[in-house]
Amino acid sequence: MIFGVPLQALLGQLLLGLINGAFYAMLSLGLALIFGLLNIINFTHGALYMAGAFAAWLVLTYLGIGYWGALLLAPLAVGLFGMLLERFLLSRLYKLDHLYGLLLTFGLALVIEGGFRQLYGVSGMPYPVPKELQGGWNLGVMYLPIYRGWVVVVSASVCLGTWLLVEKTKLGSYLRAATENRALVQAFGINVPMMVTLTFGFGVALAALAGVLAAPIYSVNPLMGSNLIIVVFAVVVIGGMGSMGGAIITSFALGLVEGLTKLLYPEAASTIIFLVMAVLLLVKPAGLFGKER
Amino acid sequence: MTEAPVLLKIDDLHAHYGESHVLHGLSFDIPQGEVVTLLGRNGVGKTTTLRCIMGMVGQRRGSILFAGKQLIQMASHQIARLGLAYCPEERGIFSSLNVAENLLLPPVVQAGGLSLQEILSLFPRLQERAGSQGTKLSGGEQQMLAIARILRTGARLLLLDEPTEGLAPVIVQQIGEIIAGLRDRGFTVLLVEQNFRFAQRLADRHYVVEHGRVVDMIRKDQLSVSAEKLRSYLGV
């Protein structure tokens, strides 16, 4: 017993918090990358996360391609779709106010979600846990379903890998520099428009990957993205718009905070993140890791 | 004295920022291997000229020939790949990159640039501060970094926008020596400069810009007889 809470319940909620944090992290990382370079608040992110989950379900149902193939195919397909979106629609908005990008992507999100709703309804489709990841481990103090552990490990590795790519490599230095001054980086001979397209593709591919990871946990449902994305936006605001490391750390931390709240004061569990956001914005308007502009 | 071949030839260049028409048919030539300055008061279009050459101004028309290639329609990164490099007035040091990353950022576009070792012996401070955040350097060091990073790329034409602005005299002198050294190595330099005393020691020729046009050209050897004329152009 800790603070009058059974240890088992505490650990259970912490694990749940970590899993939520893992999804927040993969989504907010992509959002932060995209906002940094494209200056666009990408409201399609939730819809593309859902599209990733649907892609997994579709290739399983119609092509018989299982989880492991979907883990590769869904991000690829959604990433490609994202690159087309950037090339033909978003690229026309860069010289305009943030608001136009927000409106366009919000509209697109409604269209994408509406399309899937029309085709598949809202009841949700089950997606099986792959047989290699079924079952669980008894850790003595708690039971850990293997698949949930897998999600946390994959998400943490993908986030760490992306962070290393951005912060420690040559390619990452182009990205960071272009986030500060696109025109100058292009004037050094770097094909910035192509880099922007690839970055958008990569960001939404991360969302699709999160969608595939989510499919066996939650059911595959056209609305699964819009439920999640609002919380993820709050996470990004708390972490600080455009900060990579900030987005990752904040995501996991807030997942845990949410988990703990569920235990201590369940009524506040779904609002705690917004409460944190409101208080933080009063104290630090640029977010925890953001720079004042 | 035989003229060197023309490396950059600008003809009837016009540029707009939104509603305002900044360049009104500007024309001039840069012979290969020379240091050339654009002189003129604030706001006559000197920086805009450099940005047009680099393809960084959206609305531009006219002709910009570099080694016989027409640049006017090209995207900025394609222009840089032909061997032009730009050092902006605000220096453009990236705060999210450390000094070494700033230095190595511009890709090498062709052979013939300075090696990293040569650059570090020209600018020893950059080695000492390699791990510092780029914008933590002093103004003079940032300017050195901004020049140093375009020397690696192999660009043959360097566009330098007010490299001495706001710097201490001893650093201005150092930058002057560096530019003179670059000419000796065969680089061609287009310099925008407010500091005429600095420019006159360095440049082989000066173009005077007024209201978005080149209105006069003064060679180094005519400077003494044209001093009066220059004073009236620049209002000094």
Image (cartoon, coloured by chain):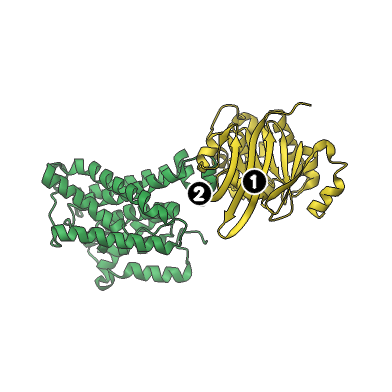
Tell me the crowding category of disc 2: few under 14, some 14 to 19, or many 20 or more residues within 10 angstroms, Cα based. Answer: some
- What residue sits 34% from the left and 59% below the top? A105
The lab-note entry on whether marks 1 and 2 share a chain reads no
Chain under callout 2: A
Viewed as shown, does residue A27 lie left or right of B104?
left
The residue indicated by pointer 1 is: B142
Asked if residue A278 can be seen in this view, the reply is yes
- Across and down, in percent, residue B176 comes to 75, 39
**In this orientation, which residue lies closer to the viewer: B124 or B80?**
B80
What amino acid is found at the position of numbered circle 2 in the picture? Answer: Arg
- Across and down, in percent, residue A51 comes to 23, 53
- Across and down, in percent, residue B116 comes to 60, 31
Judging by colour alone, the chain drawn in green in this rendered image is A
Secondary element type, mark 1: helix
User: CA–CA distance between discs 1 and 2?
Assistant: 19 Å
Asked if residue A139 can be seen in this view, the reply is no
The residue indicated by pointer 2 is: A182
- What residue sits 15% from the left and 41% below the top? A65
Residue A138, label in figure? none
Figure colour of chain B: yellow
Chain under callout 1: B
Secondary element type, mark 2: helix
Viewed as shown, does residue A146 lie left or right of A34?
left
